Image (spheres, helix red, strand yellow):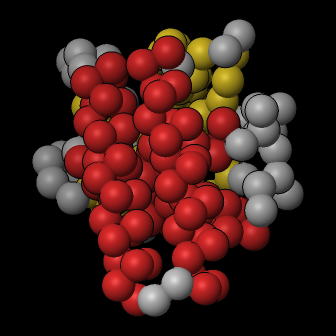
């Protein structure tokens, strides 16, 4: 399975045209295969990030960037390089602040995927609203934890959380 995607035409939602990601990959040693729904969510998140994102490192002008997400000793690793592969920095985040929301998000996603197959549209919509609310909470936590190290917009943070959640599937 290839989990790296590159884009030569990725746009930035705002800011400098170099404040963006042009490649995103997941560390193969950190991820496991998800179910088809999870694999689909992962692929969509990467595609959407590359279509439109805002990603910058305060005080640095080396973008556009490439990002490799992984797990290192139970910490989330953001290995950031320039688009041509020169290392810029690696930022490690504790996963502790994400544990509750990841657990809750996993349960609601399971309910959502089950509901898609059997529930009424009203029930599906209610579950999806809860799922989106948790996703927003997690993305704000991610933005807060990256503050001062990496700046991302709301939509990029949401998509990055989807990939963080993908890393969780291995366990």
- Residue 55 image offset from top left, x and y in percent: 32, 40
- For this view, does 95 lie left or right of residue 35? left
- The residue located at (35%, 47%) in the rendering is 134
Q: Nearer the viewer, residue 19 or 49?
A: 49
- For this view, does 70 lie left or right of residue 64? right
Rendered view: 98 above or below 75: below
- The residue located at (75%, 69%) in the rendering is 36
Q: Nearer the viewer, residue 134 or 82?
A: 134
Q: Assign the N terminus to one quadrant of the image.
A: bottom right
Q: Which residue is outermost to the bottom?
A: 120
User: In this figure, what is the number of numbered marks?
Assistant: 0
- For this view, does 37 lie left or right of residue 144? right
- The reply to whether residue 158 is visible in this rendering is no
- For this view, does 52 lie left or right of residue 99? left
Q: Nearer the viewer, residue 61 or 37?
A: 37
Q: Nearer the viewer, residue 167 or 82?
A: 167
Q: Assign the C terminus to one quadrant of the image.
A: top right
- The residue located at (55%, 76%) in the rendering is 115
- The residue located at (50%, 55%) in the rendering is 108
- Residue 109 image offset from top left, x and y in percent: 54, 58
- Quadrant position of residue 6: bottom right
- Residue 75 image offset from top left, x and y in percent: 60, 15
- Residue 137 image offset from top left, x and y in percent: 29, 40
- Quadrant position of residue 14: bottom left
- The reply to whether residue 162 is visible in this rendering is yes
């Amino acid at each position: 399975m290839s989990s790296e995607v590159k884009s030569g035409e990725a746009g930035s939602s705002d800011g400098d045209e170099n404040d963006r990601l042009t490649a995103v990959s997941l560390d193969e040693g950190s991820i496991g295969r998800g179910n088809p729904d999870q694999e689909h969510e992962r692929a969509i998140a990467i595609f959407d990030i590359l279509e439109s994102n805002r990603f910058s490192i305060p005080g640095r002008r080396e973008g556009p960037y490439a990002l490799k997400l992984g797990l290192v000793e139970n910490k989330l690793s953001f290995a950031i390089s320039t688009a041509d592969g020169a290392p810029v920095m690696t930022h490690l985040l504790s996963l502790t602040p994400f544990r509750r929301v990841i657990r809750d998000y996993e349960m609601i996603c399971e309910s959502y995927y089950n509901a898609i197959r059997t529930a009424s549209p009203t029930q599906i919509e209610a579950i999806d609203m809860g799922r989106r609310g948790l996703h927003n909470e997690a993305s704000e936590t991610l933005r807060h934890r990256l503050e001062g190290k990496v700046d991302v917009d709301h939509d990029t943070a949401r998509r990055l959380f989807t990939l963080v959640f993908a890393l969780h599937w291995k366990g």
